[in-house]
Amino acid sequence: MFGRKTAQKLDNAAAALHTAGKKVGGKTGGRVGDAIANTVIAPIRSQIDESCTNCSRGKCKKH
């Protein structure tokens, strides 16, 4: 249903949430950003059969 481009956009959105949370609240803010991404983005992302697109580009902050 969704493809590589959608996966890349979702991965970028999750990374942006982590980065924004980290800027605002430090390490704890990063965890809050991750929690929000897991709640909102993960259900959609789990339907896509692509690996982490940020890992393949060397920009992943989570894996």
Image (cartoon, rainbow, N blue to C red):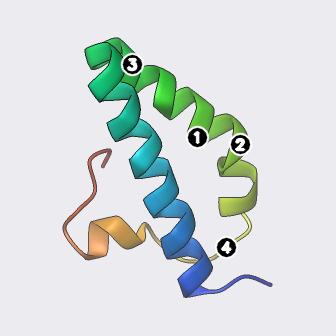
**Seen from this angle, which residue lies furthest front?**
24
Q: Nearer the viewer, mark 3 or mark 4?
A: 3
Query: Residue 45 is drawn in which quadrant?
Result: bottom right
Question: On the image, numbered disc 3 is attached to which residue?
Answer: 29
Residue 25 coordinates in the image, percent (x, y): 34, 14
Question: On the image, numbered disc 1 is attached to which residue?
Answer: 37
* Residue at 28% from the left image edge and 75% from the top image edge: 56
**Dot 1 and dot 2 residues touching (CB under 8 Å):** yes
- Amino acid type, mark 2: Val
- Amino acid type, mark 3: Gly
Mark 4, secondary structure of its residue: loop
| Distance of label 2 from label 4 (alpha carbons) | 15 Å
Look at the picture and state if 18 lies above or below 13.
above
Sooner in the amino-acid sequence: mark 3 or mark 4: 3
Sooner in the amino-acid sequence: mark 3 or mark 2: 3
Question: On the image, numbered disc 2 is attached to which residue?
Answer: 40
Question: Badge 2 local density, few (<14 within 10 Å), some, or many (20+)?
Answer: few
- Amino acid type, mark 1: Ala
* Residue at 30% from the left image edge and 49% from the top image edge: 63
- Amino acid type, mark 4: Ile
Question: Badge 4 local density, few (<14 within 10 Å), some, or many (20+)?
Answer: some
Residue 29 coordinates in the image, percent (x, y): 39, 19
Count of all numbered marks drawn on residues in the image: 4
| Distance of label 3 from label 2 (alpha carbons) | 16 Å
Residue nearest the observer in this picture, 62 or 17: 17
| Distance of label 1 from label 3 (alpha carbons) | 12 Å
Residue 52 coordinates in the image, percent (x, y): 43, 66
Question: On the image, numbered disc 4 is attached to which residue?
Answer: 48
Mark 1, secondary structure of its residue: helix
